[in-house]
Image (cartoon, rainbow, N blue to C red):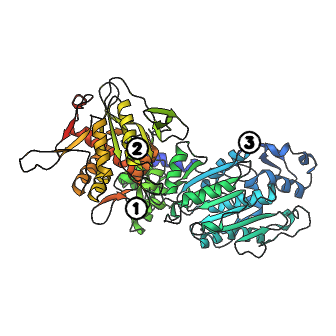
Amino acid sequence: MEANDINITPEAIASENIRRLEALKDNYDPLRGIGAHGDRVEVCTPVPGMGVARVPRAMLDDPKYAVATGELQWRTLRCRYDFEYWCATCVRIKPKDDYRNKPFILNRGQRKVLAVLEEDRLADRPIRIIVLKARQWGCSTLIQSYMAWIQMCLRPNWSSLICCHNKDSAVNIRRLYTNLVRDYPADMWDGGEDGETKLQFKPFEGSTNVREIAGRGCRVAVSSSEAQDSIRGYDIAMAHLSETAYWRETATLSPNDLIRSVSGSVALIPYSLIAMESTANGIGNYFYEEWQRAKAGESDKRPVFVAWFEVEMNTLPLQVSPVEFAASLSQRELALWNKGCTLQQINWYREKARSDRDLRKLYAEYPSDDIEAFGATDTGIFDQGDIERMLRHCRKPDERYKVVADSFVPHPEGEFEVWETPRTRSDYVVAVDVGGRTDSSDWSVIAVMRVCDEVCSDCHSIVAQWRGHVDHDILVDIARVIATYYNEALLIIESNTLESDNAAGDSRGSYVLRRLSETYSNLYRRRSAEDSSGTATWRVGFHTNRATKGLLVDGLIKAVREGEYCERSAAACYELAVYTRHRGGNYGAKKGYHDDMLMTRALALQAIYEHPSPSDIPSPKKLLFADL
């Protein structure tokens, strides 16, 4: 039976539910190695009560294995190769559903993350991971235990960093080390490198932020995203970056800068580790962008999503028969069923929804997929699902160039990105958003959009983009060169900045617009007010005010919603993600973000919408007059 059959009956659901419940009984036993990760072989053991166990094959290749005939020798050696066994025998934690400390037996979500960590480690790759998670299944516990295992069993002098959105949270995560050392089996500690040091987790040189595992030379530092300067200079091999989506972005604090600093401190060598994890917090932050890069294969990190139904404790017995419960499923609950949930899991979710007045918060903290996780916490005007669809078409440009004089010079860091060269019979629109001249100002962006036709596409498509900071006269020269290259495209420039220069008594804006009109003919022009004789004048460029900006944005919203244009730049999609309506009704990017690329798409689409048929797009050297 197909789980997504829309005609499925309550009786069929109840029958399928029995199969799903059986499938969840995995009989996981890390002591015997049953259901544990990796390439394993069954061997006889010297451990009383455990005749055989499935152990990592690599353990048998260790020269010490042949002489590890005693129980303690065998167990100690196995801990070096088998993280899950080490957790079950050496680590004690307090589960969410119990007040007593118990051996750390990994749950399904933790084993899902571990599989990725171990694949990198066993392949001798630097370990890099980003985890988007539901709440309360022990992601931080898993990551910290894994780091502790590397430090205590595999790599001496292998220091680490724990960084959270605030220091208290980092200290709370580090407390796992304190408890681990306190409860560590005395017979499993080998005395450190000198064989004699007592196991301790003590302050390093009197510091409150750094502690050391005595005898191993491994230090564990804590910090927060709000104290970025304190991190610089740390000698670390591993970093746990927790709740990254909640790291604040201000004029002086940048998650991007902090993580770049951390990444620069961790060498690209085997057993080095950077683990970034968080619940979602909207679609306009560093964590969201890094997740999207990881999904696209453009990041150094491997993405792992853990849904709420992958957490064992998120289940609740039914109070009615399975058939009766199945008959009561809502559309949303049927969607959960189609994702593979059991009726008992859906019952837990139903009760959770009843107890939570803010369903958006519920969807964010207990998401079913990554789209729901980010979309539920979004406050922007573009739908997250639509942005996800557009991101699937994004990719790195085929070529990059510097625009020098009237030519394109290949350059790996060129501002001009090209996904598609001009097609002979295609029409193009080149849109320009004018930014500032300095690196601290808004970007200037030139976007090239190919107009759809029956031959080459069923939607308009971004094919090239220039983005940088230059003087405005140089900017319009670059736009002219690009527009000429793309079949003498219609060139539309957002003229507010240049006209503001004129209003302020600065003649450079007028000079730039005049120079553009003298050197390129296929320009978008708008009708200005009539003079005393009743004659209308026409001005170069699109002038945005509250009314015309609303027109631009509404057109872009429609295009994104209905898939009327194809995006190639992931960065442009991220601008869509942070675009919102502010108090007072004005549109704009969230504080600390940009909308320069977004505006070029809106401008290009506006020019096309005024003449929706490709045959109406002006032929070369023909002026387009827009009556707005």
Query: How far from the left and from the top, in percent, is residue 326?
Result: 40, 52
User: Which percent across, then down, holds residue 306?
Assistant: 55, 53
Across and down, in percent, residue 599 comes to 34, 49
| Of the image marks 1 and 2, the number of the one nearer the N terminus | 1
Residue with the mark numbered 3? 39
Tell me how far mark 1 sits from mark 2, CA to CA: 47 Å
Residue at disc 2, secondary structure? helix
Q: Can residue 570 be seen in this view?
A: yes
Q: What is the crowding at mark 2: few (fewer than 14 residues within 10 Å), some, or many (at least 20)?
A: few
Q: 496 or 213, which lies in front?
A: 496
Between discs 1 and 3, the one toward the N terminus: 3
| Element on which disc 1 rests | helix
Residue 121: % across, % down: 72, 47
Asked whether, in this view, residue 46 is left or right of residue 406, the answer is: right
Q: How crowded is mark 3: few (under 14 residues within 10 Å), some or many (20 or more)?
A: few
Residue farthest along the left direction in this orientation? 533
Amino acid under disc 2: Ile
Which amino acid type corresponds to the residue marked 3 in the rendered image?
Asp
Earlier residue among tags 2 and 3: 3
Residue at (40% x, 43% y) in the render? 474
Task: Give the SS element for disc 3.
Answer: loop
Question: Does 603 sit above or below residue 232?
Answer: above
Identify residue for label 2.
474
Q: Which of marks 1 and 2 is in front?
A: 2
* Mark 2 vs mark 3: in front: 2
Question: Which residue position is annotated with label 1?
Answer: 360
In this picture, residue 100 sits left or right of residue 393: right
**Amino acid type assigned to the residue bearing label 1 in the image:** Arg
Is 486 drawn above or below residue 229 in the view shown? above
